[in-house]
Image (cartoon, helix red, strand yellow):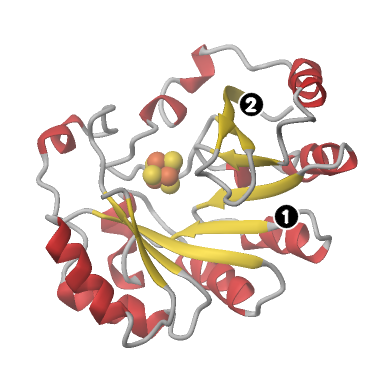
Amino acid sequence: MLPIKGLEKMSLIDFPPYQSCVVFVGGCNFRCPYCQNKDLVIGFEEKPDMDEEEFFKFLMDRKKWLDAVAITGGEPTLYPELAGFIEKIQARGFKVKLDTNGSNPELLKKLVDNSLVDYVAMDIKAPLEKYELAADSNVDKDKIQQSVELLLSGNVDYEFRTTVVPDFFAEDDAHAIGKWLKNCKRYVLQQFRNDMGTLNPAYMSARKYPKDDLFFFQKILKQYINDVQIRGI
Ligand code: SF4
């Protein structure tokens, strides 16, 4: 069973233009020090799972108001059960958005090939050569690249997105990521937030880039990608 550790009952911002609920799945294979969902990464096993039947009852009770389910984590693709869970959501008439760190291209491909996702938001932690530093983990970079290529092939709507943390992102990284993801459909720069805690407590007091720096990075990235957005400012 998918370890559902939390549910946001209504969101207008996670999968626009749809009204969605957000399912939080526990467990992650990365340890990004600036992670805002630390309780889904470490110690999540101690929190009880939400009963799947209870979730689907909630979903059907809200059918009038909800169009979609956004699945986030943690890292939802750690679990092969994800495909079956999504099938049950779709069978009830809801769209599905998936957030992923891109570390499981095999499962991602299965979901895309079987039309089990309507939108994928894939994290880009840093240029590939800096990935292990930014994710503070051993990362199979071939798998990240496979996920990138899968999304670039355009069989599902998607975005790539980077949480912009000064330790891992500077002007040269904006160029490197722009060249890497050149002509992708959509790329989002997300302002780093640390008001709800971070996986590595040192990042709770880490500096953020001011807005103007984010606009500067956006301008650089627009040399390579048409649609570059900024979130969280
Ligand atoms: S930010 Fe990093 S550690 Fe946190 S859930 Fe995403 S991939 Fe996992």
CB of mark 1 near ligand 1 (< 8 Å): no
Residue at position x 50%, y 12% in the image: 46
Q: In front of the other: label 2 or label 1?
A: 1
Q: Which residue is mark 2?
A: 3
Location of residue 138 by image quarter: bottom left
Q: Quick one: label 2 or label 1, which is nearer the N terminus?
A: 2
Q: Is residue 187 above or below residue 23?
A: below
Please say whether residue 102 is visible from this viewpoint: no
107 with respect to 217 (left or right)? right
Location of residue 52 by image quarter: top right
Nearer to us in this view, 25 or 61: 61
- Label 2, residues with CA under 10 Å away: few <14, some 14-19, many ≥20: many
Residue at position x 17%, y 72% in the image: 216
147 with respect to 42 (left or right)? right
Looking at the image, how many numbered discs can be counted on the residues?
Answer: 2
SS state under label 1: loop
Q: CA distance from mark 2 to mark 1?
A: 19 Å
Q: Which residue is mark 1?
A: 117
Q: Is residue 223 above or below residue 204?
A: below
Nearer to us in this view, 158 or 52: 158
